[in-house]
Image: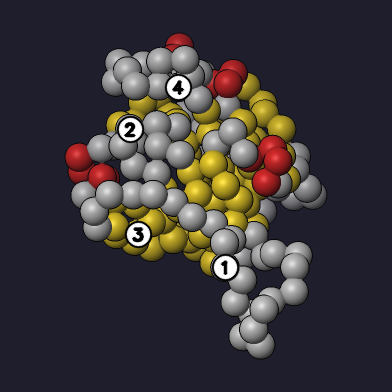
């Protein structure tokens, strides 16, 4: 088992994977709080939205998924989650597995979201200290059927998140 420290997500430490969507620190230009340019993405064709909800767990991450052609947007609407991400040299090969030692973990809080590049290994982990996490995932239509690959870590390795802030991971 590999224990990995959870990072508080910032635009700077997440930039290698995509873009953080967070409440801007600038003053809105309209009374309703509209701030354009918070995030953007380029995606061909139609998109779909998945509504996800999970209870906290102390089970480690044993596998990750990825989509070769689809960027994704995750938006946390209740609770918080830990997003595990990993890149690799041969990102376009369908025969590879995620490398547990290369996983980076980011704490994504309620009201935050991310725009994730295509081709990244990823997995959501909801810590045991969180009663429930609800989030939306926006992606290219049918990518869950046509562009989805799930693989375990090699040699049965697992990743257990810890740290990031008080009561993020298992006690």
Q: Position of residue 14 (x, y in %)?
A: 63, 40
Q: Which residue is mark 4?
A: 98
Q: Residue at x 45, y 31 (%)?
A: 121
How far apart are the alpha carbons under marks 4 and 3?
24 Å
Hey, which quadrant is residue 147 in on the image? top left
Q: Residue at x 40, y 37 (%)?
A: 118
Q: Residue placed farthest to the top in the image?
A: 155
Mark 3 element type? strand
Q: Residues within 10 Å of mark 3 (few under 14, many from 20)?
A: few
Res. 70 mark: none
Q: Nearer the viewer, mark 2 or mark 1?
A: 1
How far apart are the alpha carbons under marks 2 and 3?
18 Å
Hey, which quadrant is residue 77 in on the image? bottom right
Q: Position of residue 39 (x, y in %)?
A: 54, 57
Q: Nearer the viewer, mark 3 or mark 1?
A: 1
Front in this rendered view, residue 171 or 132: 132
Q: Earlier in the sequence, mark 4 or mark 2?
A: 2
Front in this rendered view, residue 19 or 125: 19
Q: Nearer the viewer, mark 4 or mark 2?
A: 2
Q: Which residue is mark 3?
A: 50
Q: Quadrant of the N terminus?
A: top right
Q: Residue at x 48, y 19 (%)?
A: 88
Q: Which residue is mark 1?
A: 36
Q: Earlier in the sequence, mark 2 or mark 1?
A: 1
Q: Earlier in the sequence, mark 4 or mark 3?
A: 3
Q: Which residue is mark 2?
A: 68
């Amino acid at each position: 088992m590999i224990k990995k420290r959870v990072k508080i997500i910032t635009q700077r430490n997440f930039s290698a994977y995509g873009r953080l969507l967070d409440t801007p620190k600038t003053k809105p230009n309209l009374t309703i709080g509209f701030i354009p340019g918070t995030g953007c993405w380029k995606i061909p064709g139609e998109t779909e939205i998945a509504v996800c909800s999970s209870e906290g767990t102390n089970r480690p991450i044993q596998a990750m998924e990825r989509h070769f052609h689809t960027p994704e947007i995750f938006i946390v609407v209740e609770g918080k989650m830990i997003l595990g991400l990993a890149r690799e040299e041969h990102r376009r090969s369908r025969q590879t597995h995620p490398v547990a030692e290369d996983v980076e973990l980011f704490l994504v809080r309620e009201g935050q979201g991310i725009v994730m590049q295509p081709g990244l290994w990823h997995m959501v982990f909801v810590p045991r200290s969180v009663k429930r996490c609800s989030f939306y995932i926006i992606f290219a239509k049918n990518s869950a059927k046509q562009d989805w690959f799930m693989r375990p870590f090699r040699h049965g390795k697992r990743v257990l998140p810890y740290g990031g802030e008080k009561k993020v991971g298992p006690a």
